Amino acid sequence: MNRKAVIWGSVGLGLLLAAIVASLSLGSSQLPVSESWRILAHQVPWLGNYIAAEGSEAAEQIVLQVRLPRVLLALLVGACLSLAGAGFQGVLRNPLADPYTLGVASGAAVGASLMILFGLHAFLFGQWSIPLVAFATGLASLAIVIRLANVNGRFHLETLILSGVVVSSFLGAIVSFMVAMSDKVINEIVFWLMGSLAYRGWPFVGALAPYLAFGAIVLIACGRTLNIFALGERQAAHLGIRVQRTRLLVLVISTLMTAASVSIVGTIGFVGLVVPHLVRLAVGPDYRLLLPLAALYGGIYVLAADTIARTALGSAEIPLGVVTACLGAPFFVYLLRKNKKTAGG
């Protein structure tokens, strides 16, 4: 087993534990770390009989019904977006590709906003309505971006990113128009524009978990194939890889995870860009290692950003999308400058 993978996997687990401890303990109602974990341990069937539940009922409600589902949802969202970003980068062979820069997140937000504006989600497929429609519009926006960026069967870095920016801007304008047209649901649509984990409880955790489980299994199974993709599509075809089918599979699965995340917590940018790149710097370009570690560190990244978002201003809460954009935009500029220097020799 790769020694770097063991090291960074262990570091990630340690950071994950620290991030969970901090998120469960910090907030408008400060709770001692010991009390938070005593409440959690008391819920474990084989452990609860040996630990007394000394916390108040209010503290128990805060930990179990407010903070714990929010922690788990942050981990799921971060893992989904990070895996999706790694999938896009691998199959398009572009380190700047991610759900945000390719317009997938904006496309998914359009679908979700349409469902909310016209109240259609109550009449179609219940809790699955918004993710399914968001997936369809996200996939459509990705198809448009790829079509615009395709020059004689090849993708150029500048063309791909420019196409993503143009499509994202246009779709953002559509969402803004829907905000202007809405009355009763204006706050719900603004939520999708800014991204937040607030008021998202256990039902949303259960809704997103299957998307992550299915997407992670498929993408991790494609790890070896994505390694071969790095050699070029022609070489991959010579080695027996079905290039078109593999590209379509990875793009669809990555879009599905992005759409599911956006439909639940709104547009959260740069997670799929920053995390896979940092993991790649740490453990190398082997997607068999990069994908599971990207899921781990993506969850940590979003959980840490959400903890900052809800504690930095005291009782007021910063939208999660604002925090991830403030952290991710400078990193995007760094990557863009680095790629321009590399291309220039």
Image (spheres, grey):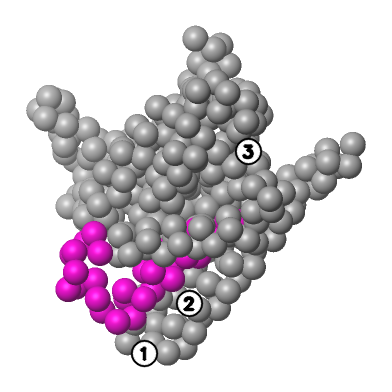
- Magenta segment includes 116: yes
Q: Which residues are magenta?
A: 101-129
Judge depth for marks 2 and 3 and give the one in front.
3
Residue drawn at (31%, 39%), measured in percent from left and top?
214
Residue assigned mark 1: 183
Disc 1 packing (10 Å; few <14; some 14–19; many ≥20) = few
Q: Residues within 10 Å of mark 3 (few under 14, many from 20)?
A: some
* Residue 74 place in picture, x, y as percent: 40, 48
First in sequence, mark 3 or 1: give its number.
Answer: 3
Q: Where residue 254 appears, x then y in whole percent? A: 44, 46
Q: Residue at x 48, y 77 (%)?
A: 175
Helix or strand or loop: what does disc 2 sit on? helix
In this figure, what is the number of numbered marks? 3
Residue that numbered label 2 is attached to: 175
| Relative to 222, residue 97 above or below | below
| Residue 56 is at least partly visible in this image | yes
Q: Nearer the viewer, mark 3 or mark 1?
A: 3
Residue drawn 27% across the image and 55% down it: 204
Quarter assignment of residue 28: bottom left
Q: Which residue is mark 3?
A: 93
